[in-house]
Amino acid sequence: MNISRVYSVVPFLLALLILAIGIYPNYIEQVLWNLIDEIKNAPYKYINIILSLK
């Protein structure tokens, strides 16, 4: 039985992700909070950019 590379790489990447979350939980939490803040402020940044073009 031949297994494609995708099916062998995906579990490996997921295992690495789980290890990274386990080893660096504070760093990953900080990155996630920064992303959440950027997403929440995205409409205001867009509006400010558009209004400054006038």
Image (cartoon, rainbow, N blue to C red):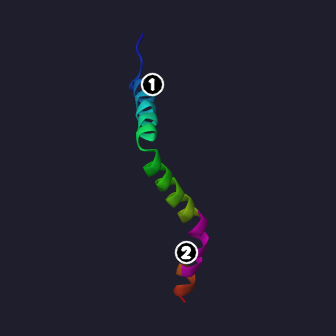
Side of 1 where 40 appears, left or right: right
Q: Establish if 30 lies above or below 19.
A: below
Separation of disc 1 and disc 2 at Cα? Answer: 40 Å
Q: Residue at x 41, y 44 (%)?
A: 24
- The magenta stretch is 40-48
Q: Return the mark for residue 39.
A: none
The amino acid type of the residue labelled 2 equals Lys
Residue topped by disc 1: 7
Give neighbour class at mark 2: few <14, some 14-19, many 20+ (Cα, 10 Å): few
Q: Which residue is mark 2?
A: 45
- Give the dominant element type of the magenta stretch: helix, strand or loop: helix
Above or below residue 2? Residue 6 is below
Name which residue lies at 53% across and 79% down.
Answer: 49
Q: Is residue 51 above or below residue 31?
A: below
The front one of 42 and 37 is: 37
Location of residue 27 in the rendering, given as x and y in whole percent from the top left corner: 43, 51
Quarter of the image for residue 54 reads bottom right
SS at badge 1:
helix
